[in-house]
Image: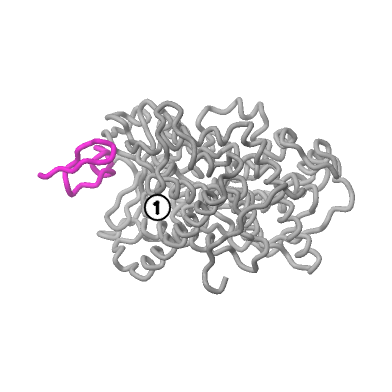
Amino acid sequence: MAETATTAGAVLPRGFRSAELGWPELHRIPHPPHRLPLLGDILGAGRRTPVQDSLRYARELGPIFRRKVFGREFVFVGGAELAADMADESRFAKHVGLGIANLRPVVGDALFTAYNHEPNWQLAHDVLAPGFSREAMAAYHPMMLDVADRLTGHWDRELAAGRSVDVPGDMTKLTLETIARTGFGHDFGSFERARLHPFVTAMVGTLTYAQHLNTQPFPALLRRAARQNEADIAYLDRTVDALVRARRSGGGGDGDLLDRMLDTAHPATGERLSAQNVRRQVITFLVAGHETTSGALSFALHYLSLNPRVAARARAEVDRVWGTTAVPGYDQVAKLRYVRRVLDEALRLWPTAPAFAREAREDTLLGGDHPMRQGAWALVLTAMLHRDPRVWGADADRFDPDRFEASAVRGRPPHTYKPFGTGARACIGRQFALHEATLVLGLLLRRYDLRPDPAYRLRVTERLTLMPEGLRLRLERRTAPAAPAGTGPEPQQAGQQPAGSGPQEAGSAVRCPVHRAGD
């Protein structure tokens, strides 16, 4: 039988899939009942909700299970012990598969999508890591305040007009402008637009197309969607190319991420990022740097609106630490420990990057029981890991920020909370996202009372990332300091079952030079 090499270096017989051959005793891993010939485990599953369907299967099948869709077999891991085993960097590494590989036509070998053997990952990581140092973060802080000020100005206008606010849409505008300003000195003008910027439309299009490819047995049938995906990719490329040209013609910026990409050599080798790789990294940061953070903020605001006592406690902390009028400094954000716990708990229930794949570096036993050959891989379903009752308790679906009180964190085993992935390939912008989101939550809590729509029930849309769908909130402008912590009604049981079960910154940013017709 002919052979073919996998990206991990293992040699597999041609015609077999790595997930099938790489798990010698795959039959021992349970799968959903009523598997259909050729079609697989599609009964009771939706093409648009694979993560939420998998969460439901996890409740029925346990900490490890498999799903087959149109001849493609996937192994899911969510039990805390097995996930901790796969976090062992000496035996497992990042696997680029499923929807992530489907994004390579968009960003190639950028930080998020590079295969482990591709050299550009290490080069870009070493060049860009100083851009997320404490000193760099402190320099970004005033720009984050400026974008947040634009958000609150928009929300004040919506409030004055008697309208509710579109939380996911506005959080997307906020986080896109934040990463564009801080990383690339660019202003998309999102809050001056009646609709989302076409960059966001194109970005969502590429993510949605990549998701659809996961469950489409005949990609050729997606001809129209494929043409739109090509157009979306071309638009992303044009936008970034124009941004880079503007920077080069302007003689450089203030040492932001784009300056590092264009001007910084690797400290050891002297190598620089190629023009193509600069484009890929910029798109990666613009997409990944705002999409997951906007989802995290949206979920956190949803739960705050449903839990007045939690919101009052968080607001009291903001009033105590920041006061009611002062502009918060960089160091004051980390002092909002309870607000941060609200964010952590929202990311526990709905990690906006809902899974990450890991592959065996060599033949090994997962959990001492499941044989895996070199190159075999599995998806660690983060939302499943974050709801393991053996770690999080019988009420794991309930929203409770005190799960992240310091003593509770110390009492949990390691590797049980992974909203940013794991190991060397974990999210490079983690601290950026956490600082931005904590700052924004603090500013919004200090300014508004959040009122939910009584008829709204959480719906989660999936486009590789997770986002609340159709979430709108009513606002009330605060006129007095918050009530002391611990007052107000008891928290609601807000955990949702899976579906089916500041001031202006000095200087000016470059306005977006590329537009679509009609925008």
Q: Looking at numbered disc 1 in the image, what kind of residue is underneath it?
A: Leu
Look at the numbered disc 1 and give the secondary structure of its residue.
loop
Q: Is residue 123 above or below residue 149?
A: above
- Between 490 and 335, which is closer to the camera in this rendering? 335
- Between 376 and 143, which is closer to the camera in this rendering? 143
The picture places residue 208, in percent across and down from the top left corner, at: 45, 60
- Residue segment shown in magenta: 1-27
- Between 66 and 348, which is closer to the camera in this rendering? 348
The picture places residue 318, in percent across and down from the top left corner, at: 79, 40
Q: Residue at x 59, y 57 (%)?
A: 468
Name the quadrant containing residue 209.
Answer: bottom left
Mark 1 — residue? 103
Q: Is residue 381 above or below residue 479?
A: above
Q: Residue at x 32, y 33 (%)?
A: 360
Q: Is residue 5 magenta?
A: yes
Q: Quadrant of the C terminus?
A: bottom right
- Between 465 and 495, which is closer to the camera in this rendering? 465
Q: Is residue 164 magenta?
A: no
Q: Residue at x 79, y 68 (%)?
A: 162
As drawn, which residue projects farthest toward the left?
1
Q: Is residue 419 above or below residue 221?
A: above
* Mark 1 Cα shell of 10 Å, populated few (<14), some (14-19), many (≥20): many
Q: Quadrant of the N terminus?
A: top left
As drawn, which residue projects farthest toward the right?
480
The picture places residue 265, in percent across and down from the top left corner, at: 45, 34
